[in-house]
Amino acid sequence: MAPPTIGWTISQWRETQVACTQEEAIKRVIDLVAYFDKSDPAWITIATPEQINAQFDTLAQSGTVPKDLPLFGVPFAPKDNIDAATFPTTAACPAYLYEPEKDATIVAILKAAGAIVVGKTNLDQFACSIAQRKDTIGIL
């Protein structure tokens, strides 16, 4: 059965996460991630409970009050060509795999606003199919 958070808006996530304890907020995200189908090709990497806890711990250690964070506890998943610390990056090519030491700028901005990385999503290998298609039809 799907968790009751499936289909929530960003506002619904934030409002609910700010109104509860940190433990409840963490559990809500962990429960959502537990629902993800590991065999679904949409996912390259799915966050572990430890990765989720560490992100909430970082927010708590920042000293910022959750209500002051515009995305507190809101889950998000960058494409796998965008670095997120503690998550491998592959650009959908296993031979390209590396472990980034820091977040890409956009991931850092979202996390600083309180958002939580719940995994990395699949994409066309190296995200280059649009250029290839345009070239094929003579747009480039």
Image (cartoon, rainbow, N blue to C red):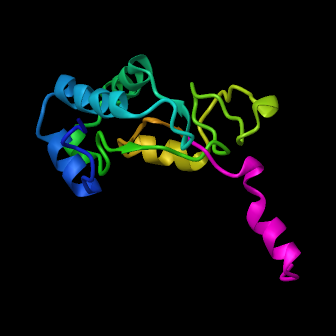
Query: In x, y percent, where is residue 139?
Result: 83, 82
Q: Nearer the viewer, residue 32 or 68?
A: 32
Q: Is residue 14 above or below residue 23?
A: below
Look at the image and say whether residue 126 sits in the magenta stretch.
yes
Q: Quadrant of residue 54?
A: top left
Left or right: where does residue 82 sit relative to residue 42? right
Q: Is residue 97 above or below residue 133?
A: above
Look at the image and say whether residue 1 sits in the magenta stretch.
no
Left or right: where does residue 38 sit relative to residue 65? right
Extreme left residue here?
Answer: 19
Q: Quadrant of residue 75?
A: top left
Q: Quadrant of the N terminus?
A: top left
Query: In x, y percent, where is residue 128?
Result: 77, 58
Q: Quadrant of the C terminus?
A: bottom right
Query: In x, y percent, where is residue 20?
Result: 12, 34
Count of numbered circles in the view: 0
State the residue at coordinates (29%, 39%). Answer: 73
Q: Nearer the viewer, residue 15 or 36?
A: 36
State the residue at coordinates (87%, 74%). Answer: 136
State the residue at coordinates (32%, 44%). Answer: 74
Q: Is residue 131 above or below residue 49?
A: below
Query: In x, y percent, where is residue 57?
Result: 35, 22
Q: Which residues are magenta?
A: 121-140
